[in-house]
Amino acid sequence: MIRYHITRTPNRKPRISRIFYITHLLFFLTLIFSFAYAGEYHNSTNKGAPAETLACSQCHSMHGSQGGVSMVYDESTRGYGGSVNAVYSKLLRQSNILNLCLFCHHDNEAAMGAPDVWDGGNITNQSAGLLCYNIGGSPPCADSAKNHTVDVNVTVTVPGTISSPITLNGFTCVNCHNPHGTTSYRNLRDNGTIYAPPGSSSITYMAVGETITYSMTTTATRDNTKYVNMINLPSLGQGLDKYKTSNVVFKLAPTTNTAGIQGFCKSCHTDFHGAGGDSNMGGAEPTNPWKRHPTRDTSIGTGATNLHADSACWIAGTTAAGCAEAFNTTGWNRVIDPNTTDENNGTAVPFCLTCHRAHGSTNHSNLIFGPPTSVGGAGTMMRQTCQQCHNQ
Ligand code: HEC
Ligand code: HEC
Ligand code: HEC
Ligand code: HEC
Ligand code: HEC
Ligand code: HEC
């Protein structure tokens, strides 16, 4: 049993121990033969993870020191974060949750084998995008218009909650990800659980029994019984390829307001998602016009029938005559495609990640312009997303 993934040399520069690699190899070998999934990392077999990857000591230290050396992750070179020899609340190895996560998910991503979520580096075109694209530095990100602006000090009101305001006292990674794992994709909070840190509104994530199911495969085969598929992976389990946009596809359309990625986002952005006929949404066409952009209960084909979308251009998949400029020159929008094989027929459903990156992009409101072939999309104008489906 590994106790510490990081050992410290006397000059306190973090160094990855050999046992770290051995453990990763063992995890990797175990996962090849495993087909029961939960978030693959920071998760326990109790929650269905195929291998034990919830190493308490990656984030907590019982006494603050090991071998007489401080267990605080040394962030002194970046000028923020904790001080070596100090101890922190909840026995954490950094001064706050954000700095703790970013120690591996930004500063030392290469050494740790963790995806950089801050300003890029070790993955080409991450599915979630980046929390501080092209700027970097210490949190909060200097440009707050293009990302979920995580910051331990800020009190924010969540957009889309005018009907019943939700405020967060400090907005960090763990408002969305459970640091101790869940059975959902990327350990997102789920299953009707409540998280209510001091000073923040109490938020219920999705509904009891609902999780963001997913599958992984080394082939291009789709599994339309799962919300998310990670395809064409060199191997199952851990490894950074499963975080690339090109390997992540969305297959199952939710049938309740609290299900799927949309249901997760709605946990906070309550007014921005709902069924056709809900007062916040309007819809479904043709009897009831939409009042907010639909994210369920419609499809491009339905939109075409109602003369609101252009499935012919979507299906043609090229810059065909009569289709809008810049249509699909480098790929399709990300959509929920509920088919087993087809990628571009009229059944596709638009959803939050058609237009937004979950962490952030190069464009305002985390938007993707056009197809998601880069963190911000390949286009230069917002309408290059819209025109693929609407051709106005
Ligand atoms: C000690 C280093 C370390 C720290 C600290 C750390 N992580 Fe990670 N994290 C990793 C590694 C390594 C991976 C797995 C990379 C892989 O998939 O091979 C990972 C993966 C993840 C994933 C993807 C899980 C999956 O399998 O889909 C999430 C989400 C995540 N971390 C969130 C967090 C959050 C939130 C925090 C702070 C509370 C945090 N991490 C702190 C090292 C770390
Ligand atoms: C990826 C980092 C990470 C790992 C790994 C981790 N924890 Fe935590 N843990 C946290 C963070 C961050 C908090 C503070 C959560 C908060 O304030 O909401 C926390 C809080 C706690 C708490 C306080 C109760 C709570 O939820 O606030 C306990 C107890 C705890 N962890 C135990 C464990 C145990 C036991 C393990 C190993 C099985 C473990 N943790 C692994 C990051 C981690
Ligand atoms: C824990 C609550 C929470 C969840 C869950 C959540 N958000 Fe947010 N979101 C916020 C807060 C708070 C803000 C406003 C502060 C900011 O911009 O970071 C925000 C802002 C945004 C913005 C505007 C960003 C900007 O730059 O102005 C977009 C777009 C967005 N969220 C999309 C999403 C999507 C898509 C999901 C689901 C994948 C989601 N959110 C899930 C809390 C949440
Ligand atoms: C508003 C909610 C939210 C916040 C805040 C957030 N994440 Fe995420 N994160 C997500 C979602 C949703 C995904 C999956 C998006 C996708 O696949 O397109 C994700 C994906 C990831 C991944 C997988 C890499 C990828 O590009 O898909 C890691 C690792 C991760 N998050 C870690 C973190 C860390 C560390 C923080 C804080 C520094 C953080 N997240 C803040 C919602 C959030
Ligand atoms: C068809 C594209 C599209 C879809 C689908 C979409 N959005 Fe947006 N979103 C936008 C655009 C464009 C903006 C910029 C402001 C505007 O036009 O309303 C935006 C803005 C936002 C904002 C910022 C609002 C504010 O007050 O600052 C949030 C939050 C948000 N979206 C969340 C979501 C969530 C959650 C979903 C899924 C339930 C979603 N969006 C689905 C295109 C979309
Ligand atoms: C992936 C496909 C897709 C994308 C991308 C998309 N939409 Fe839509 N949009 C739809 C569908 C499907 C409907 C529902 C049509 C229906 O039910 O009749 C819709 C409905 C609408 C409506 C309401 C139409 C009506 O009269 O009821 C408007 C307005 C709209 N979209 C604007 C936009 C804008 C602006 C963008 C870009 C920011 C955008 N859409 C991006 C598929 C898409």
Image (cartoon, rainbow, N blue to C red):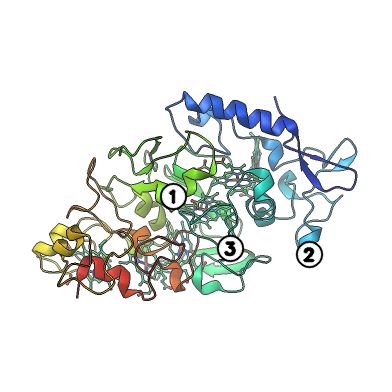
Q: CA distance from mark 2 to mark 3?
A: 18 Å
Q: In percent of the image, x 45 and y 67: which residue is there?
A: 366
Q: CA distance from mark 1 to mark 3?
A: 19 Å
- Quadrant where the N terminus sits is top right
Q: CA distance from mark 1 to mark 2?
A: 35 Å
- Image coords of residue 236 (percent x, y): 47, 33
Chain-order first, disc 1 or disc 3: 3
Residue where numbered disc 1 is placed: 205
**Disc 3: residue Cβ within 8 A of ligand 4's nearest atom:** yes
**Circle 1: residue type:** Tyr
From this view, report whether residue 310 is shown above or below residue 232: below
Q: Is residue 343 left or right of residue 132?
A: left
- Callout 2: SS: loop
- Image coords of residue 189 (percent x, y): 48, 47
Of labels 1 and 3, the one closer to you: 3
Residue where numbered disc 3 is placed: 150
Q: Is residue 11 left or right of residue 227?
A: right
- Callout 1: SS: strand
Judge by depth and name the residue closer to the eye, 292 or 155. Answer: 292
- Image coords of residue 136 (percent x, y): 63, 66
**Circle 2: residue type:** Gly
Total of numbered circles in the picture? Answer: 3
Q: Quadrant of residue 65?
A: top right
Chain-order first, disc 2 or disc 3: 2
- Quadrant where the C terminus sits is bottom left
Residue where numbered disc 2 is placed: 79
Q: Residues within 10 Å of mark 3 (few under 14, many from 20)?
A: many
- Callout 3: SS: loop
Query: Is residue 230 among the parts visible in the rendering?
Result: yes
Q: In percent of the image, x 55 and y 25: which residue is there?
A: 29
**Disc 1: residue Cβ within 8 A of ligand 3's nearest atom:** yes
